Amino acid sequence: MKINWKPWLQPDGLSAPLSDHASSEISNMQGSIFAPPGMATIVAIVACFFGLSHPLYLMWVGIVVAAIWLLPLPFALRVYFRRRQKTFIQNERDYQTAQELRPALQSLSQQPSDSFAQVEPSVGPELRPFRVEHHLSSSLRADLRGSHGWWGPRSMRGRAVPDLLDSSTMVFLTNEAGDETLRVLLPSPRATREMLTQTIEAFSDELPHRSHTQMALNSFAMGDDLLLSPVTNPQTIDQLNAACDRPLLHRPAVNVIGNELQPGIVLGTALEVDGQTRAFLPTGLFQQLQGAITSIAQIEGKKVPQLVQAVQ
């Protein structure tokens, strides 16, 4: 039966509630400190009863062994109190960070995803559409990681996620002379939802499990009306598709905002059609989100997804 050691009283001046992470740390420390004395007491009692019906020296051997186990106890207690004090201080900082992070995340979650300026620049000159293609698929990308010991793999873990460019649209553009073309890959709204999920998970993995800051970060959420509706633009795609049947100069003028993957191919995050900008991937939101988490929680998010890397 596992003993649930209750954390002792908090040091003076520290009032933050203990996170599950801090409680687990203190419980583990208490168990490591008090388990040996408990075992020593059991050994001493058993040795005393054993000595009643066996040679007396066996009893003294048991008592000596128990005493040896108890000798390091004063030193272990000093180490414990230092580590316990450090844990409480870290929990206090963690709680304050979470209290600062929550309103910043809440502010972002209440704004439409397309209200933030796109991060990418305009690519190329003003062009006009001549073909639109839809790429419907449902694929997964897997990531498998593990560690190795002397006798082979020690632990393995993995995660399968939807391809960020499933159900994307390809828009083909050309200039007025018809001697220059550009292919623009537009991600679907599904990419926005999945990229947000992966971004939160990437930062969350850098934080202690069930700490105050991790719980605040994992509570971030945006409804489809604010996250997906602003980047769902079927009318714009239909407008470009229908315009392909008209004479070139009567088709809408298009400016592309995005990242050039290679000459002639662009990953578009927004299109400016006849002066009206329509976002397809809210990179401004992701930049603001990552900036808030990085500056407040002081973590880098080493595995934050980048859509350009996903394509390449």
Image (tube, rainbow, N blue to C red):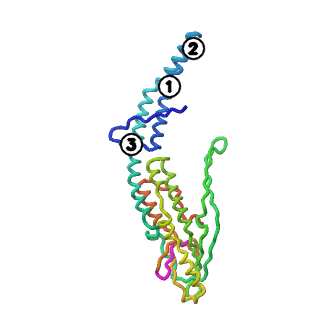
Q: Earlier in the sequence, mark 2 or mark 1?
A: 1
Task: In the rendered structure, find residue 50 and report the number of the disc placed on it.
Answer: 2
Q: Nearer the viewer, residue 85 or 194?
A: 194
- 104 w.r.t. 84: above or below: below
Q: Nearer the viewer, residue 196 or 233?
A: 233
In the rendered image, residue 211, in percent from the top left (x then y), is placed at 46, 47
**Which residue sits at x=52%, y=24%?**
39
Crowding at dot 3, Cα within 10 Å, few <14 / some 14-19 / many 20+, comes out as some
**Which residue sits at x=55%, y=87%?**
176
- 28 w.r.t. 252: above or below: above
Type of amino acid at the residue the image marks with label 3: Ile
Check disc 3 and report its element: helix, strand or loop. helix
In space, the residues marked 2 and 3 are separated at their CA atoms by 47 Å
Name the residue tied to disc 3. 89
Crowding at dot 2, Cα within 10 Å, few <14 / some 14-19 / many 20+, comes out as some
Q: Residue 209 lies in magenta, yes or no?
A: no
Type of amino acid at the residue the image marks with label 2: Phe
**Which residue sits at x=48%, y=54%?**
218
Q: Is residue 257 left or right of residue 130?
A: left
Name the residue tied to disc 1. 38
Residue stretch rendered in magenta on the structure: 267-275
Q: Earlier in the sequence, mark 2 or mark 3?
A: 2
In space, the residues marked 2 and 1 are separated at their CA atoms by 18 Å
Q: Residue furthest right?
A: 151
Mark closer to the observer (3, 1) = 1
Task: In the rendered structure, find residue 279 and report the number of the disc placed on it.
Answer: none
In space, the residues marked 3 and 1 are separated at their CA atoms by 29 Å
In the rendered image, residue 292, in percent from the top left (x then y), is placed at 42, 59
